[in-house]
Amino acid sequence: MREINLFELKAIYRDSMRIRGYCFGEGEKTLCVVGAMRGNEVQQLYCCSLLVQCLKELEEQGKLVKGKSVLIIPCANTYSMNTGKRFWPTDNSDINRMFPGYDKGETTQRIAAGLFNTIKDYEYGIQFASFYMPGRFTPHVRIMKTGYENVEDAKKFGLPYIILRDPAPYDTTTLNYNWQIWETKAYSLYTQETGRIDKKSAVKVIDSVMRFMERNGIISHSGKSGHVSDVIPEGELLAVATAQSGIFESCVEVENQVKEGHVLARIIHPYNGSVLEEVKATGEGIVFFRHSDPMVYSGTVVFKIIPRSAFRHSKSSRVN
Amino acid sequence: MIEDIVSLGLPVDEKIVLRKNRILPECMDENTKRICIVTGTHGDELEGQLVCYEMNRILKENKGHLKGIVDIYPALNPLGIDTITRGIPGFELDMNRIFPGKKQGSMAENIALAVFEDIKGAEVCIDIHASNIFLREIPQIRISEQTAAELVPLAKLLNVDFVWVHSAATVLKSTLAHSLNTVGTKTLVAEMGVGMRITKEYGRQLCDGILSLMQHLGMWDGDVAPVREPIVSTDGRVEFVNAAMGGVFIPAIEHCMHVREGEYIGDIVNPMNGQVLVHITSPCNGLVFTLREYPVVDEGSLIARILGE
Ligand SMILES: [Zn+2]
C-alpha cells in the first residue's frame, strides 16, 4: 500500500485540506473508489476505510493480480467533515456538482479538477454515494444512462438491485456522469445510511466491491456469490407521498414486501398524538427507499417501492 | 389582491404558503397582457425586495396608467428568506435547479411546480437575483445564447448597465428562467448588487426599466424615465480573476470602475504575519462589473469579473 497526496488546498487559519489516496498494486489503472465528498457522508468514509483494510490484507497475502492497480480515496472534503457542514464550508457549494472541475476556477471546481485529473483514466470507477433526500435505501448499484453505461459489469457486484437513472440536468456535473463521459465504467453504490455508521450494510457493500474486483480479475479472493441483480429503471419505482405533515412513524423497513393498501407509515399530530394519515402502498412490491427523518412535510415522497411489474426487465426474477 | 399559489404543511403547527400580489388594470379584455416580477428564489438575495415594494407603490399611486396585469412574487423561498439561507432549509438542491418541479418529489419540487404553472403563459417574467454575499454586481441581465435573439431587445429596455449573453451549461436547464423560456414565457434574469443587502439606487434603476418594458408592451401609459443603453456582451469578452491563494482580500479599486491591463486591483494578505500573499493586477483593459465584497477568500474564490474593451 502506498499513500499519495492528490491535492492540497492551503489556508491561512486552518491546516491544509488534503485529498489522500491509497494505492494498491502496480500497473494498469483498473479501479478507483471514491468515498465522502460531502461532510455528512460518514458511512461512505467508513466503507472506504474497511476496503483499505481488506486490500491491505490481500496485498500481504499476495492476492492482488499483477499488472493492475487500485486507488481508494476515502474523503475529498475534510474541511466540511471536520466542521459538521454538508457542503463546502465557505460558499456552501457541492463538490459533486462541480465535475469535471476547472483548475483555474472557483475553489470547489479546483478540488473537483484536482481529484478528477487523477481518477479519470481508470477503467472502473466506484463512488459511495448519498441521496438528496434523507432516507434509507436497500443497498444497490446506480448507473446513469449516458449512452456509455455498462449494465453487464454492474451485475458483478452481486447486489440485489441495479437502478438505471435517466440523468437530470443537475446530474451532468456529478462524478458518476463525468467518469462515464471520460469512458470510465462508473457505478454509484448506495448503502443504508449516510450520517451514521451502519456496519451491516457497510460490510454488504464492501463484500460486493470485493466480488466486483474478483470477477474483473483484479484480486483473487473467494467470497459469497451474492445476488443475481434485478435491473430496474428508476422511473418504474412507485413513489408514495404524504398528504399531511407531522411526526413520521414508519411501519415497514426497506426490503419488506408489501401489498397494495398496506400501511407503510403513520403521520402523527405533533401535539395531540392523533393519527393524521396512514400512508399506504400504491401497489404491490418491495420497499426500496424509506424516509428516515422523524418529521415530515406534506407532499413529500417518503417511500419508493419496486413494483412487481418492474421485475420483468430482469432475466432472472427472484420474486414470483 | 393577495393570492395563495401553493400551501404545504410543515411538521409542527405551521404551513408554508407561497403568495403573490396580483394588480389588475381598470379595464381588461382577453388580450390584456400579464407580467410577472419574481424574486427570492435564493433566500439571502434581497435586492428584489425593494423592486417589489417600489413596483407595488408606483402601481398603486398610478392605477389609471396600468394597462396590463402585474403579478408580484416577492418570496419564492420564504423559509430561506426567514433563515438567511440561499437554498431551502433542509433541502439539498438549489431551488433554481429543480424547475419545472414535479408533483411526486419533495416539498421543494412541489413548490417549484406550482410556481412554474402559475407564471407560465405570462407575456414576460423578470426573475430578480442579487449575486451572493461574496460578490457585488452592477445591474445586469443574463441571457443564454439560445434565447438571445428574442430576449436581448427586451433586456435593452430594462435600464441595466450590462446584458451578458452566456453559453448555457446543461445544469442551467433546470432554472426557472430556462424552464419558462422553454414553454414560450419570455423570462429575463436580473442580477444586481450583493447578497443580504439592498442597494437602493439599483432597485430604483430596475423599476424604471420594468416600467419602460411595460410601456413597450402596451401595459403602461404613464411616465417613463429615459433608459440607459447597456453594454451587450458574450462570454468571450469576460475575464475572470480568481484568488491564487487563500487569505484576506483588500481591494484597491471601487466596484464598477474601468481598469487598465496590469493595473493594481488589490491584495490577498495574511493578517497573522503582515505578508502580502498575492498582489492582484488586472488581466485586461475593461470594466470591473463584478467585485469581491466578502473579504475572506479560499484559493479559487472569485475576486473580479472584468468586461474587456
Ligand atoms: Zn440568485
Image (cartoon, helix red, strand yellow):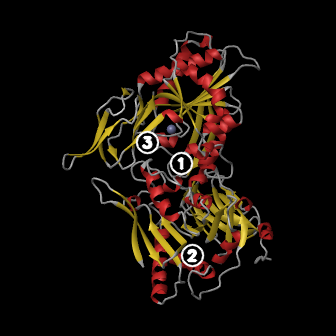
Coordinates of residue B29 in the picture (x, y in percent):
75, 17
Q: Quadrant of residue A313?
A: bottom right
B244 left or right, relative to A269: left
Which residue position holds label 3? B84
Amino acid tagged 1: Asp
Coordinates of residue B36 in the picture (x, y in percent):
62, 28
In space, the residues marked 3 and 2 are separated at their CA atoms by 39 Å
Amino acid tagged 3: Ile
Mark 2, secondary structure of its residue: helix
Coordinates of residue B98 in the picture (x, y in percent):
61, 46
Which residue position holds label 1? B13
Q: Between label 3 and label 2, give the one nearer the viewer.
A: 2
Between B201 and B297, the one nearer to me in the picture: B297
**Chain under label 2?**
A
Observer able to see residue B83? yes
Q: Which residue is located at x 55 percent, y 52 percent?
A: B11
Q: Is residue B305 above or below residue A319?
A: above
Q: Quadrant of residue A320?
A: bottom right
Q: Which sits earlier in the primary sequence, circle 1 or circle 3?
A: 1
Q: Label 3 neighbourhood size at 10 Å, few (<14), some (14-19), many (20+)?
A: some
- How many labels, in total? 3
Which residue position holds label 2? A205
Between B56 and A75, the one nearer to me in the picture: A75
